[in-house]
Structures are given as structure tokens and as C-alpha cells.
Image: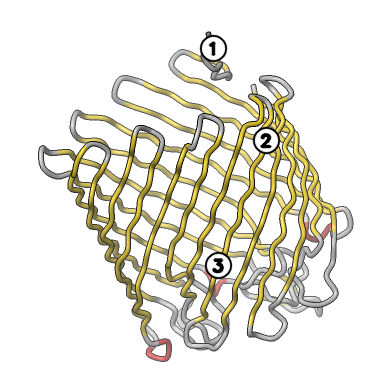
Amino acid sequence: MDQPDDPGGIRIGRLLAIPSLGTGARYDSNIFQSDANPTSDVITTLTPRLTLQGDWRVFHLHLSAGGELGFFADSSADDYQDATVELAGSVELGTTSIEGGIDIKRSHDARGSNDVPTSATEPVIYRDVRAQIGGRHVTNGLHYESQFSLRRLAFEDSTARNGSHIRNDDRDRLELRETLRVLWPLDLGREAYGEVTFNQRQYDRIPDDGGRVRDSSGYQLLGGIRLDLTELIRADLAAGWMSQTYADPAFGDIADYTLRGDFDWSVTRLTNITFNAARTVRETTQTGASGILALEAGAGISHELRRWLSLSINAAYSSESYQQTTRHDTITQLGFGIGYDLNRFAQIEGGIAYDQRNSNSSGEDYERLQSHLRLTLEM
């Protein structure tokens, strides 16, 4: 008879502490995502993390803190020190549940990213704070879900190759979202739903360096269905309409169809297939562009050859249209990974990935090959 999995960690009363430490190396053939004369490098990473989980009769708690330190073999100016702290909790009160959380990050945009000037001599460091609170109420006929979230982004300035000052506070902003969802149970494992989401995006600098006002507000209407069939197939499929209205009349409005799809199929106990897709409006500070109308899709297959040996293949595609400009990008990605459990405390994981961007904007194409090997120790 199979023995139950050991959850690991250190038990402290009702709390479970899970410390982990990862270290690895990554080869990147094009660290700046350059169209011509790509620069390659090897990046060594160190990723410590401590997670606390607590379960009481009606209350659940999750707290984690960690980070990633990256050290480039040649381009030391691109070294980074990312950190994150996450706190989440939920309360179950009969037919009503309430959950909330906050996520505080110190991260970076690498040189070569879309909104990082090509003349920058270092990555752009930014702080990303997200907070949300939501609830769910179940009645005999309908289920109701709601969520309110806010996100605060603040970017540090950087330096150009000629020594001049690059201001990045054009990107500083506050984003708010409010979602209301009503669900109709159809039969066991199936729910139809209608959903409306409102958003407001408020920038600190009005106008920005280009003389534009980037504040906007919008909505997204979705109708969909959720499936949860015998724990083998889980899916959330929806389609509808979205609109984004900009304060600056030069930007006009964006109004188009939207969709969302998440699919998870446990083909066998050893094989799992996932698929996801979404069509959204994303933010950008590219000159002249109001936003990015993006269609993204991805798929993955994972399989356990043995209990201690697993393989995975994943692919992704993105189509990005920069509104109010003629720029259009397509990005394709393909990756392969393998994981090997040395014992219950240690795992080795490695992989190789290829991604490519094709753009009708001069100088924005790139190809990149990455490979990595990582050791993770978890108590």
C-alpha cells in the first residue's frame, strides 16, 4: 500500500514552516533581446524562501518571504536583487467566505525590455505592491463572488551610457479593479456565470514626458462556464466585450472582444495537460501608444516517468498590437524541462527554452536561447 506523502517542513503548533534554498546557473544567448549583435552571458542565481502555513477551524493563513539574487559572469551591471513578501488569509463562515492578501515586491525590468530605454546602463528597479480582498456567498439558487484589488507601481530612475539622467517616473501609477461575479449551478461540477470588472489606471505624472495623459478607465463583461469533473478536468471558459477609455483625446478608446480560458486535464495519475488563453489591454509607455491589445495563449504537458523523474514541454504565443501606432509584435516560445528528486529534501531541475519576437517595427526583432540547471533544497 502506498504511504501518504510527507508534507515536510517544521511543525510549530498549528503552523507549518517550510524553508527552502535554491541555486542555479542560466545561460542566455541574448540578454538584451537585441535584433543585431546579441550579447550572451551566464547568470548564477540564489533563491532563499521561508513559507509559513496555518490552518484553524475557520481561518487559513499563508505567509512567505524570499528573493532571487542574480549575478552575471560578464555584465555585472545587470546583477539584480529581487525580494518579495506575501501575506494571505481566508475565513470560512458557513455559506460565506472572505479572503484577502498583500504582496510586496522589489523587482527589476531587464535592459532590453519594451519600456526600458535602449541607452540604459542598468536594469530598472521597481516596487510592486498588490492588495486585494474578496468574498463568496452561496445561496440555494445563486452563488456570488466579488473582489476589490489595487496595485501600486513605482520605478526608480536610471543612467544612460552618456551619463545623462533617465526618468522612469512616467510609469509610476495606481491601478484599481473591482469584480462582481454571479454563478448559476447547472449540475454537479458545472457552473455558468456572468462577470463584470471595472478598472481605473491613474498615473502620477500628468502629462508624461511626451505630453500625454495616460490615465484611463474601463470595463470587461464576460459570460462563461466553469467545469470541475471528478477532479480529472477543470476548466474556466469565458468570452465577452471590453473597453478602455483614455483621458487624453489623442489616444482615443479601445473597444474589442475579450476572452479567457484555463483548462487542466489529468489524463492519468502521471500525465497532466494544461491550456490557457486571454485577450486583454495592457499598459505601455511606448511613444504614441495608448496601450497594448494582447492575445496570449499557452499550453503545457507534464509526465512522471518515475515518482522521482518528471518531464515537461510547454509552448506559448502572444500577439501584441500597440494601439494608436502601426507596431505589431508576435512572440513565440517553446521550452522543455526535466526534474529529478534526489531525495525528499533535494531536487535537481533543468531545461532549455527558445523564444523569438517578430515585429514590423525596425530593430525590435530578436531570437533567444536559454538553458538552466537548478538545485533546490527544501525541508
At x 79%, y 57%, the residue is: 28
Q: Residue at x 81, y 80 (%)?
A: 162
Residue type at tag 1: Asp
Q: Nearer the N terminus, badge 2 or badge 1?
A: 1
* Amino acid at circle 2: Pro
- Residue at the spot of label 3: 318
Asked if the residues shown at circle 3 and circle 2 are in contact, with their CB atoms under 8 angstroms apart, the answer is: no
Q: What secondary structure is marked by label 2?
A: strand
Residue 191 percent coordinates (x, y): 24, 46
Answer few, some or many: residues within 10 Å of disc 1's Cα (few below 14, many 20 plus, some between 14 and 19).
few
Task: Work out which residue is located at the far front of the displayed protein and give it.
Answer: 268
User: Whole-Å distance between the Cαs marked 3 and 1?
Assistant: 42 Å
Which disc, if any, is residue 48? 2
Please give the residue where the numbered disc 1 appears in the rendered image.
Answer: 2
| Quadrant assignment, res 41 | bottom right
Q: Residues within 10 Å of mark 2 (few under 14, many from 20)?
A: some
What element does badge 3 sit on?
strand
